[in-house]
Image: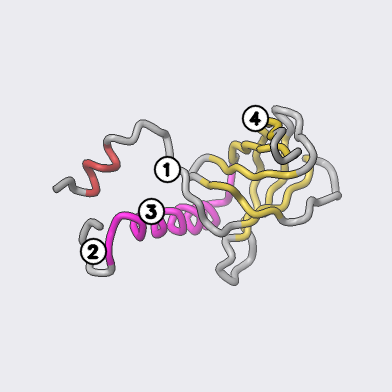
């Protein structure tokens, strides 16, 4: 049986992508006009992906508020649009955002949230591999 460490070592991504109930609101850097919160399609330690009706320019700098839906204040950080792809079947756009700087406590909270979800996907309540 593989250990969790062996399972994670075979993944060549920089960070696991997780499908978590998480929301983000954003504003173009320097703008006071914030988007409505959108549910993320997936999230990782380095970025996030969501879908919306309008495109974002690749490289656009963003102010972000990430709501982990844990009853606490959303995490504020900067980021930029890494990519934007049209989904013609739904007439929407998939947006990939690379996360930038977060303050230390927000980064810690964010990473702990992701780690807890990764572990819950691989371990049962007794701490054994599923």
Magenta extent: 101-124
Compared with 68, 46 (above or below) is: above
- Taking the image as shown, residue 9 lies to the left or right of residue 42, namely left
Q: Residue at x 73, y 44 (%)?
A: 52
Give the x, y percent position of residue 73.
Answer: 63, 66
Please tell me in which quadrant of the rendered image residue 124 appears: bottom left
* Residue designated by label 3: 118
Q: Earlier in the sequence, mark 1 or mark 2?
A: 1
Rounded to the nearest angstrom, the CA distance separating label 4 from label 3 is 25 Å
> Is there a contact, CB below 8 Å, between mark 3 and mark 1?
yes
Q: Quadrant of the C terminus?
A: bottom left
- The answer to whether the residues at label 2 and label 3 have Cβ atoms under 8 Å apart is no
In three-dimensional space, the C-alpha distance between marks 3 and 1, rounded to whole angstroms, equals 8 Å
Rendered image coloring scheme: secondary structure
Which residue does the numbered mark 1 point to in the structure image?
A: 16
Choose the circle earlier in sequence order: 4 or 1: 1
Whether residue 90 sits left or right of residue 102 in the image: it is right
User: Does the magenta run of residues contain 48?
Assistant: no
Q: CA distance from mark 4 to mark 1?
A: 18 Å
Residue 39 point in image, percent of width and height: 64, 54
Q: Residues within 10 Å of mark 3 (few under 14, many from 20)?
A: some
Mark 4 Cα shell of 10 Å, populated few (<14), some (14-19), many (≥20): some
Q: Which mark is residue 127?
A: 2
Marked residue nearer the N-terminal end (4 or 3): 4
């Amino acid at each position: 049986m593989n250990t969790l460490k062996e399972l994670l070592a075979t993944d060549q991504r920089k960070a696991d992508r997780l499908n978590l109930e998480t929301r983000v609101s954003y504003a173009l850097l320097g703008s006071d006009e914030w988007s409505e919160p959108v549910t993320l399609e997936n999230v990782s330690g380095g970025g996030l992906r969501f879908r919306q009706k309008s495109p974002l320019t690749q490289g656009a700098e963003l102010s972000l508020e990430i709501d982990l839906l844990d009853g606490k204040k959303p995490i504020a950080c900067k980021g930029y649009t890494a990519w934007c792809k049209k989904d013609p079947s739904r007439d929407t756009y998939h947006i990939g955002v690379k996360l930038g700087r977060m303050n230390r406590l927000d980064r810690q909270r964010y990473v702990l949230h992701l780690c807890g979800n990764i572990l819950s996907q691989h371990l049962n309540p007794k701490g054994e591999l599923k």
